[in-house]
Image (tube, helix red, strand yellow):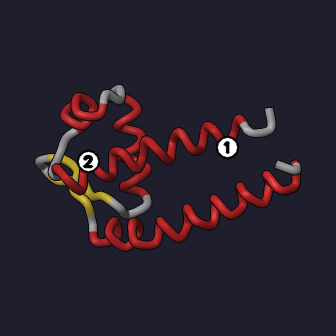
Amino acid sequence: MLTSRIDHELDLLERHLLILRKVIQSGPIGIIKLSEETGIPDHRVRYSLRVLEQKGLIAPSTHGAVSTKAAEQFLNEFESDIDKILEKTRNIKEIIGW
């Protein structure tokens, strides 16, 4: 299906954002606690933490993950990014004639 890759990427984005929000709210927080609080399996939490760390949005500490100043900037800009995605989605719907 043409949209399966997009669907997969949106699932990943949703999970990464959920983990980021938990780290911001409850950090420092470890993998097990994140897994328990979100219901996301440990291995997926670990992957999301790695992605968020590579993007500079979180940092490891001896007590678990903590958010960085870049996380705040990311969230401030994220609404604009989502608006752009929504606009593209509306354009696609118009192409189809909906």
Q: Nearer the viewer, residue 48 or 92?
A: 92
What residue is shown with label 2?
22
Q: Is residue 64 left or right of residue 47?
A: left
Marks 2/1: CA distance?
Answer: 24 Å
35 to 14, vertically: above or below: above
Secondary-structure class at tag 1: helix
Q: Which numbered disc flags the more N-terminal residue, 2 or 1?
A: 1
Q: Nearer the viewer, residue 43 or 10?
A: 10
Location of residue 69 in the rendering, given as x and y in whole percent from the top left corner: 28, 71
Secondary-structure class at tag 2: helix
Q: Dividing the image into 4 quarters, which one contains the N terminus?
A: top right
Identity of the residue drawn at 80% across and 38% down: 2
Identity of the residue drawn at 25% across and 60% down: 67
- Can you tell which mark lies on residue 82? none
Location of residue 44 in the rendering, given as x and y in whole percent from the top left corner: 40, 33
Q: Nearer the viewer, residue 31 or 14?
A: 14
Amino acid type for the residue under numbered disc 1: Ile
Location of residue 52 in the rendering, given as x and y in whole percent from the top left corner: 39, 53
Q: Nearer the viewer, residue 38 or 94?
A: 94
Location of residue 8 in the rendering, given as x and y in whole percent from the top left corner: 61, 37
Q: Is residue 75 left or right of residue 98?
A: left
Amino acid type for the residue under numbered disc 2: Lys
What residue is shown with label 1?
6
